[in-house]
Each structure stands twice: as structure tokens, then as C-alpha cells.
Amino acid sequence: MINFLQRIGKALMLPIATLPAAALLQRLGQDDLFDVPFMASAGSALFDNLPLIFAIGVAIGLSKDGNGAAGLAGAIGFLVLQEGTAAINENIDMAFLGGIISGVIAGLLYNRFHNIKLPNWLGFFGGRRFVPIVTAATMVLLAGIFGYVWPPVQGFIDSIGQWIIEAGALGAGVYGFLNRLLIPIGLHHVLNSLIWFEFGSFEGASGDLDRFFAGDPAAGIFMAGMFPIMMFGLPAACLAMIIAAKPEKRAQVSGLLGGLAFTSFLTGITEPIEFSFMFISPLLYVTHALLTAISLVVTNIAGTLHGFGFSAGAIDYFLNFNLATRPLLLAGIGLIFACIYFIVFYAMIKGLDLKTPGREDDEDDTTIHEGDDKYHAMAKEFVAAIGGYKNIQAIDNCVTRLRLQIDDMNQIDEDRLKRHGAKGVMKVDNKNLQIIVGTDVEFVADAMRNQQYTGFSSGDKRRQTTLMSPLKGTILPLQQVNDAAFSSEAIGKGIAIIPTDGRLYAPTAGTVNTVFPTKHAYGITTTEGVEILLHIGINTVELDGKYFTSHVEQGEKVQEGQLVASFDIERIQAAGFDISTPVIITNVEANQEISSNSDGDITPKDSILKINS
């Protein structure tokens, strides 16, 4: 469940990324700045349609390949849900939560049905085209259910939101404390989304953030207290760690923490700082969470209100200065918290002998990667420290973290990761690893993916993948297969085999990503990302599974030579079907060469294809 919620939290970052643009347009268009009404209206349009944007963004974020079809399904799902529930009860407003629910369902349905095969007479609606259809049908059913069950749920959510808002300083403090405590497991985005976009209402706007920009004089109580922490407190904590560092490492640590402090001050992105001490001293991190709570309490009591479109950094502070209440007092509170953070952090680091950056006992120096090849070098070192690509199931990232799915967590070399740029390493469970990099994490993730799929890095040899024969039989050139989709290589490159034995084996190790319901075709993805389609016979989908037996399940890991399926050759041929079996590489890249190693008769021990990258 935690992993699933983390995936939702990560998916939320895509639509949240639109908020700075919305806030910027809306503010610059106001009459106290540039007085350009169409700019203000453009920004307001984004805020007015946030639920729809969240439905699209969450669906894309949860989809396994980020395809736009998932986003379309999310939009359709939300519109169906919104109008369907309103037809039953016009007082229902699922708003932001309706967008998230629609996006989650659309993303999950996309992952399940994006490669579905339908009968020939319905073939046009197969694959990704089927996803919006099944999403709409699902949301019709949910609209019928939510139309009757949502009113009490909506009332419960409203009561919680109202309590938190009316609790004043106490509610703000509880939120501030939980906001920081949830960062290690990545669930703070979920909490933030409820506070920012769901709780409270004002002239059609809901949530503290949306209401602030809509002009609600009571909005901003959950955002104002973040400015003293992000602009002043954590930069001061960085200064404390620099001064507490060993003299010989102070210059190096200054470069590292100084950059992080400026990022926090300017943009409000704090995770790289927090992960630099989070696991070194949980006590210090809990102290930080308590200070955050105190900041929200103090700013609430002082009557200061402020808001942001992205985070509580200087950019948002000055951009929304004229919308804020007592912003100069807020800056003064920030200076006080800077002093508190410096004193508390320096005293705890020295008093408890905490091994913050620059105080480590090891003699290994951190390697600073610079230049145009910086991210390539970091990616190469990260992959080596993780145990190579064979130990990586999936590579993803959010704003500051690499999010990896790992086969064997025991192979992780945390010290090597930190020496080459990781601000922190967190093992969520025995399969999920998070590496805190910073705001340039996307470049590192892209470099890791590129190296994985192209096989190139400085000094590396070309990557080669060899496929063994999945069948006993006779090689048939793909161009001679009696099906234009295969013979024209429209589906991909490869060969075909005329089997003499009704047993299909895995041609290489990998993960079964597709088991067709009719059991006549299977998709396997290797650890290098090569996608293989094994299609038993031509047009055998029409047999609807008759004469086929599957021995694997979707998502199962298989080893080379493992039995995947069995089939009755004689009965299939007696039914009038061609038994020629294409073996296809469906995701051939432009730089890849596919070569056949065999002709004539083959057995499952013979290599049949080589993929050179």
C-alpha cells in the first residue's frame, strides 16, 4: 500500500508542475503588476480546471510508458464521473479527489489493457484505443455508485478540512509536523494535495493554495509558515553543517551545501538538504519537523498569510508579495528562525558528534562530477553501485529522487552512491530504492536509461543480446511468413520458426509482460529492455485459446529455456491454421542491428538472433 501511495505521490508531481506557470500568469496579469487581463484569465483557467489536469497528469504518471493515451483516458474518465454523479445528485462535487480517482483508474486500466488484442472485426479498437473505452465504461459504473455513496464521504472530508482550518495554529502546526515527517517515504505529496487543493472553499475555489490565488482573505495559513523554513531555516542549517565540518573538508562541503542552501532559498526545494542529515540523525530530523510545526504556529498567531504556486522560496515570496498579509513580518520571523536553526543544528552536530557532510570518519573523498559528461559519469557510477542493469527492474524519477525497482537490495553500495553525488539513499522495502540527487535528477535518470538501452558509455564495448530458439523446428525467413503485418516488419524485426514440437520456451531471461487471453502469443522483456513477441501460428487468435496451454503468468520472471506454453500442432493445422511462429523484436532502435545466426533445423539450445547496440 505504501508503494502504491508513493506511485500516486510521484504521479501528482506532473500536474503540480503546471502550477508555477498558472501562478505566474495569474499574478503578472493582475492590475498591481502588468495589468494584462488575458494573462490573468489564462492563469485562472488552469486553476479552474485543476481536477481535469490532475486526472490527465496522474493517469500519465501511473502508466508504465507515460503514453498520451492514458492521459486521454484520464480526461474521459473524469468527465464521465463528474457529469454522471452530478446527474444523480447536483450537490456532489468530487473536484480534486475526482480527478485523482479518475487518473488512478485510467492509469491502472492502461497498464492492463494497452496491448489487448480483439477479434479481427473489432481490431481497430484494440491496443491503446481500447483504454479510453474501458475507462469510460468503468467510470459510468463508478458514477452510479458515487452518486449515492459520495455525499456522506464528501461531508466527512469537508468536516475534517473545516476542523483543520478552524483549529488555527494547532491545525497548521500538525500539518507542518506531518509534512516533514512524511518526506522520507514520499507521501507528503498526498498530504499536501489535500491541504492545497481540497480543504476549504471560497467562490468556487477549494484548498489553501487555490483559495489564496482566488483572493480568499483567510487562505495561506498552511503555506506562510513554510517560508521561514525554506528561505531562512534550512540555509542556516547548511551554514551550521559547513562550520561544523572538518577544516580540510570545509571548502568541498561549502560548495556542496552552499548550492543546496541557495536552491532552498530561491525555489523552496529542500529535500537534498534534508536527506543530508535525515538518516545520519533521526533525532535531528524530528527536531527539524518540530521547528517546521512551530514556524506554522508562530506565523498563524502573528496573522501572516502568504502563498505559493510551487514552493516557499524567494521567487514565490516576492512574486506574491502584494497578495500576502504582513509579508515583512514574515521575513522577520524567517531571520529569527535562521538564528534558531543555526544554533540548534551546530549544537546538536557538535554535541552528539553527528557525521554530517564533512565530518565522516571514512577517508574516501566525494567525487565531484563536472563538465558536459557530468550526468553520464554519475549514471555510470550509480549503475555500478547498484549492481549493474541486471539488478534494475525499472528506472523512474520525481523532482529530486531517482526511484528504482531492484532485484537484490543486498547489492547496493550506499557509500559509492554518496561519493558520486547522491545526497541520500533510502531503501523503501526490499524492492524499491530511492536515491536523492537534487533538481537535476532527471538528467541522471535519462543518462541511466540511455546507457541501458544503447549500451554505450565511455570505454564500454557494444552491448549484445543473444536469443536462443524458443522452439524445435525449421527456420523460416520473416519475409516469407503468410501475414503482411509480420513479413513487412511492421511489428518488428526477427525470424519465424515452423515448429515440429508443441512446446514454446523462453528465448532469454526476462519478465513476461504480456500473456494474451487466447494463450497463442507472449511478450517477454529482457533486463536490457529488449521486448520480444512470441506468436504461435498465424491468425490463431481465432481459436480463442483452444489447443493452447499457458505455463506462465503476466509479470512472472522467466529464465532462458523455461517452458512458456504448449500447443497441439496437429489439431491447430487440422483446423486450417498456419503454424509458422514469428519471433519478433518489437522495439528495435535505430542504432541496433538484428542478425540471424541460424538456418535450417534448430533446437531450443541453438542461438537464433543477436541484437547489437
Image (spheres, rainbow, N blue to C red):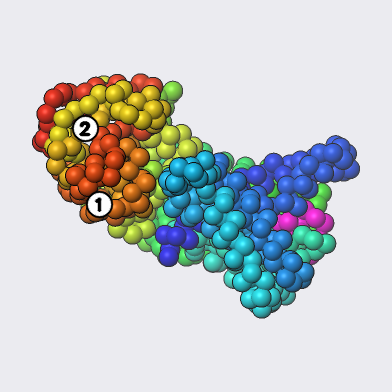
Name the residue carrying label 1.
547
Q: Is residue 379 visible?
A: no
Image label count: 2
Left or right: residue 74 compared with residue 22: left
Report the span colored magenta: 208-218
Can you give x and y, in whole percent of width and height, for residue 596 in the image?
Answer: 21, 23
Nearer the observer, 252 or 561: 561
Q: Which numbered marker is on residue 205?
A: none
Q: Quadrant of the N terminus?
A: bottom left
Residue type at mark 1 is Tyr
Left or right: residue 95 compared with residue 290: right
Q: Is 606 inside the magenta-drawn segment?
A: no
Q: Is 214 inside the magenta-drawn segment?
A: yes
Name the residue carrying label 2.
497
Above or below: residue 581 compared with residue 142: above
Q: Is residue 428 visible?
A: yes
Task: Classify 10 Å Cα crowding around label 1: few (below 14), some (14-19), many (20 and above).
Answer: some
Q: Are marks 1 and 2 in contact (CB under 8 Å)?
A: no
Q: Residue at x 82, y 43 (%)?
A: 40
